[in-house]
Image (cartoon, rainbow, N blue to C red):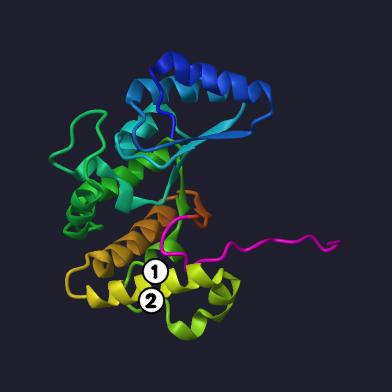
Amino acid sequence: MHQLSGPEEARDLVNYWAALGAGSFKAYMHITRAELSAAVAAAHQHNTKLTGHLCSIGFKEAAALGIDNLEHGLVVDTEFNSGKSPDVCPAQNDTFATIAKMDVEGPEIQQTIRELVAHHVAITSTLPVFETFVPNRPPMQWMARPLEALLPEERIAYLEGRSRTAANAASTPWNTLLQSEMKFERDFVKAGGVLIAGVDPTGPGGDLPRIRRSARS
């Protein structure tokens, strides 16, 4: 994946694609604060929105820079990771371990929620993906349609991955993380935040996007 060389390139990329009709933009994990700030400003000049799956930038930082939406929610927010350096994406497992130990009702996370709501930043929920990281979730009786939709080799890969997840049930943080993410999203909505229902093309492959069809289709 191409990495930006700086804020000028971030601005130029947004301007180029907006001129060709792009209606929204997504920042990814290693973007710097200067690059994100430039991209957000350019997107808003074109009356388009910018979302992000962030890692090098914490949620409160991104909100202050004017981002419109954040993907995935609390479990990818690196601002609570004590070893994080500015503009650097820390190891994902370190972030997961940090979040798993935190109280969603505690002052740090609640302050993040308040700042996101104050800056009108939406959150895209991807709980169906996170559920597949939890041992023996979702129940196999719910998996008939997703398994039928997969290519045979992908079906095997999913089932093998599910078995590995179950084998690591004692050490995975995802039993706690899924519960924390659900609490975070609930509290975010209660505080007035806008929560968007999403899916995600990553994960072990146990999810199907829902396609909404019009009455005429």
**15 over 180 or under it: above or below:** above
Q: Is residue 62 left or right of residue 46?
A: left
- Overall secondary structure of the magenta stretch? loop
Percent across and percent down for residue 27 are 45, 34
Disc 2 marks a residue whose amino acid type is Arg
Residue 204 shown in magenta: yes
Query: Which residue is situated farthest in the bottom direction here?
Result: 141
SS under mark 2: loop
Quadrant housing residue 34: top left
Classify mark 2: residues with Cα within 10 Å, few (<14), some (14-19) or many (20+): some
Magenta residue span: 202-217
Percent across and percent down for residue 63 are 38, 34
* Front in this rendered view, residue 166 or 158: 158
Quadrant housing residue 138: bottom left
SS under mark 1: loop
**127 over 58 or under it: above or below:** below
Give the residue number, with chain letter if any, for mark 1: 132
Residue 211 shown in magenta: yes
Percent across and percent down for residue 89 are 26, 37
**81 over 87 or under it: above or below:** below
Give the residue number, with chain letter if any, for mark 2: 137
Disc 1 marks a residue whose amino acid type is Thr
**Image mark count:** 2
